[in-house]
Image (cartoon, grey):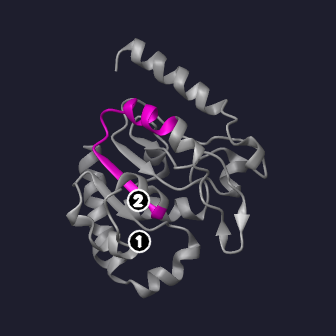
Amino acid sequence: MNQAGSIELNDLLTSVRDCRLCESSLPLGPRPVVQLDANARILIAGQAPGRRVHETGIAFDDPSGDRLREWMGIASSVFYDAAKIAILPMGFCYPGSGKSGDLPPRPECATAWRRQLLNAIPDIRLTLVIGQYAQRWHLPSTERNLTETVRARRSYDKSLFPLPHPSPRNNIWMKKNPWFLESVVPELHEAVSRALR
């Protein structure tokens, strides 16, 4: 990307980090957490930061991130290299918690920012579409549930790789679906390696 494009992305990221669109709905206040560089090759389209990520300001700085890096087969040094990996959740701030985990991502982020930010990272070769909210946005034509969507991954564009959320809360799902670790994770390793070459 040329210098002008880099300045535009920096301005856009500054605007995102200053965003207060849904401040009144956030229990801990706004703290947008994204990781973007115009040269990124892989996009992680997740849900929303959890409480720990809100506190540190570092995307996937929690057990979910440990599992995701293991699934991808990469070290933290690669994961947090913005020129390689972009991290753009559906909601940029911690939405609070409900009865069975964190609340859904706030919808304001996708409406206000997602298209602009995706346009600013034109060299993405692989998008990891994590969880139902990201899958609804990135795979809008699917009417499958999360399990069916992950199982049908080969029916989507090769640049899109649907995944369940790596949260420890999904341990029961993992036990019920052993095919995920047996066949999907090795495919993911290869797709990530190919995208980073």
Q: Between marks 1 and 2, how big is the CA–CA gap?
A: 8 Å
- Tell me if label 1 and label 2 are in contact, CB under 8 Å: yes
Question: Which image quadrant for residue 149?
Answer: bottom left
Seen at 74% across and 41% down, the residue is: 23
Between discs 1 and 2, the one toward the N terminus: 2
At numbered mark 1, what does the secondary structure look like: helix, strand or loop?
Answer: helix
Expressed as whole percent of the image width and height from the top left, the position of residue 39 reads 36, 31
Vertical position of residue 1 compared to residue 56: above or below? above
Vertical position of residue 141 compared to residue 184: above or below? above
At numbered mark 2, what does the secondary structure look like: helix, strand or loop?
Answer: helix
Q: From the viewer's perspective, is 64 left or right of 4?
A: right
Q: Quadrant of the N terminus?
A: top left
- Residue bounds of the magenta highlight: 113-132
Expressed as whole percent of the image width and height from the top left, the position of residue 2 reads 35, 15
Q: From the viewer's perspective, is 89 left or right of 22?
A: left
Expressed as whole percent of the image width and height from the top left, the position of residue 172 reads 52, 84
Q: From the viewer's perspective, is 100 left or right of 130?
A: right
Instruction: Say if the magenta span includes residue 115.
Output: yes
Vertical position of residue 166 compared to residue 55: above or below? below
Seen at 46% across and 48% down, the residue is: 79
Expressed as whole percent of the image width and height from the top left, the position of residue 51 reads 71, 57
Residue at numbered disc 1: 146
Seen at 47% across and 24% down, the residue is: 9
Residue type at mark 2: give it.
Gln
Residue at numbered disc 2: 135
Residue type at mark 1: give it.
Leu
Single out the residue that lies furthest toward the bottom.
Answer: 176
Q: Nearer the viewer, residue 165 or 118?
A: 118
